[in-house]
Image (cartoon, grey):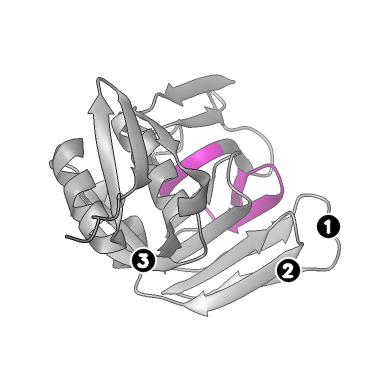
Amino acid sequence: MIQCFVPEGEKQELTLPDGSRVNINAGSILLYPKEFKGKTRSVYLTGEANFSVEKDKKHPFIVNTSYLKVQALGTKFNVQAYTEDDKITATLENGAIKIDKIIEDGNSFILSPNEQLEYNYRTGVFEKREINVANYSGWTQGELNFINQPLKEILATLQREYAVQFIVNPHLLVSDLYTIKFTTHENIDAIMKILTLTVGDITYEIDENIITIQPQKKKGKT
């Protein structure tokens, strides 16, 4: 097996032995064989990757994560499965994919284009929804799109993308959801300025690669 490790702050694109193309996001590991043999084309993912799969009906293409396996014949889709997250998300751009749990329990899902399946492995709950797929594969084009996400998840993504570390006052990690879009050519200071304006009543301080976020001090009455 070949291991492709993409550190935080970086991305990588590669071609698999069957000609399928993969964009691998920051903080991810992809394991794949030097040559596909047997009845399936299986790879193993921790993190996030976007797959453009070469068609081969006789040899299904399977992405294995910690809890789910995503099977495709010839299609383009995105899988997000970071170990620090509570959920695994599969998003289909075109074609069709079949999703099962690694330990099969009768839960099986077929996605059509512009559909997404989210599995929370802590609660065991699946959620299938229709989405604008461009918002979820935009990272391959240099975009960061956050759709109804809490501050905790936004910061986790920024930490991987910019190889920084956040120190956050725990009172700020509430359940409020935010929708915001960045381009990755923006530096982290510019992004933090926009983020603090969006969230409101917070301040930040950057010391090399450590960013501290605190509630904004209330001004006293004069």
Task: Tell me, yes or no, whether the two marked residues, 2 and 1, touch with CB atoms within 8 Å.
Answer: yes
N-term-proximal mark, 3 vs 1: 1
| In the image, residue 106 above or below residue 150 | below
Between 161 and 75, the residue placed more toward the observer is 161
Which residue of the protein is positioned furthest toward the bottom in this rendering?
A: 130
Which residue of the protein is positioned furthest toward the right in this rendering?
A: 105
Whole-percent x, y for residue 23 in the image: 35, 41
Residue at mark 2 = 108
Magenta highlight range: 46-71
Which residue type carries mark 2?
A: Ser
CA separation in Å, label 3 and label 1 = 35 Å
Categorize mark 3 by other alpha carbons within 10 Å: few (<14), some (14-19), many (20+). some
Q: Residue at x 42, y 49 (%)?
A: 51
Q: Residue at x 63, y 51 (%)?
A: 86
Between marks 3 and 2 in the image, the one whose residue lies nearer the viewer: 3
CA separation in Å, label 3 and label 2 = 31 Å
Residue 53 in sight here: no
| In the image, residue 6 above or below residue 62 | above
On the picture, is 135 further left or further right than 154?
Answer: left
Which residue type carries mark 1?
A: Glu
Whole-percent x, y for residue 142 in the image: 20, 47
CA separation in Å, label 2 and label 1 = 8 Å
Is residue 48 inside the magenta stretch? Answer: yes
Which residue type carries mark 3?
A: Tyr
Between 221 and 218, the residue placed more toward the observer is 221
Residue at mark 1 = 104
Disc 1 element: loop
Categorize mark 1 by other alpha carbons within 10 Å: few (<14), some (14-19), many (20+). few
Q: Residue at x 32, y 36 (%)?
A: 161
On the picture, is 4 further left or further right than 185?
Answer: right
Residue at mark 3 = 178
Disc 3 element: strand
